[in-house]
Amino acid sequence: MNDRIADLFTLHGPLVYRRALQLMGSAADAEEVTQEVFIRAAAALDDFDPRARVSTWLYRITTNYCLNLLRDRGRRRALLDERADEAAPATVPYDLPKMVQMRRLLAEADPREAAAAVAVFVDGMSHAEAAQVLDVSRRTVGNLCDRFVRWAAERLAEGT
C-alpha cells in the first residue's frame, strides 16, 4: 500500500498542492494540507471505487479538507488577518483582496454551496465538470451556485 500511495503522490501531488494553495493562500498551509490529504487517502484507499477517477477523488478530499479548515473560526481569523496584506504568489493569477473576501464567505457558507462555488467560480469549471467532481447533477450545481451568489450578495451588502 505504501508504494501505491507514493505513486499517487508522485502523479497527483502537484494537483493537490495547487488546489490547497489556491484555497488556503500560503505555501506552508498548502504543504500541510497536501500531506494530510494523502494521509487521508491512504486510510481510505481500500474503499476507493476503482471505476472513479483518482484525480476527482483527491480533488474532493482536498477541497473538503480546505473548506473545513477555513470554517474553523480561530484558525480562519488568524489566517485571514495574517494573509490580508501579503502579495499573491506570481504563479497564482488572482486578486488577493478578492480571494481573502471569498475565503471569508466560503468559511461561513453552506458546505455544499461553498464546494459548488469553488468549483465554478474559483476553478472555472463548467457546471457539467463541477457536477462530475461533486457527484451531483448539473442542475444541482446551478442551484447551489445560485444560492451561494444570493447569500454572498446579502452578506456583502450587510458589510460582512
Image: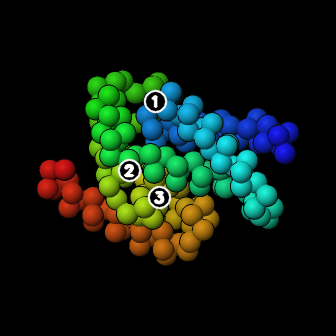
What residue do we see at 73% from left, 47% from top? 42
The x and y percentages for residue 117 are: 42, 58
Q: Are the two marked residues, 1 and 2, in contact with CB atoms closer than 8 angstroms? A: no
Q: Secondary structure at mark 1?
A: loop
Identify the amino acid type marked 3: Ala
Residue topped by disc 3:
115
Instruction: Specify which label sits upstream in the sequence, 1 or 3.
Output: 1
Seen in the picture, residue 62 relative to 144 is either above or below; the reply is: above
Seen in the picture, residue 5 relative to 81 is either above or below; the reply is: below
Q: Is residue 3 at least partly visible in the picture? A: yes
What residue do we see at 49% from left, 32% from top? 29
Q: CA distance from mark 2 to mark 3?
A: 13 Å
Residue topped by disc 1:
26
Q: Nearer the viewer, residue 22 or 142?
A: 22
What residue do we see at 67% from left, 42% from top? 38
Q: Secondary structure at mark 3?
A: helix
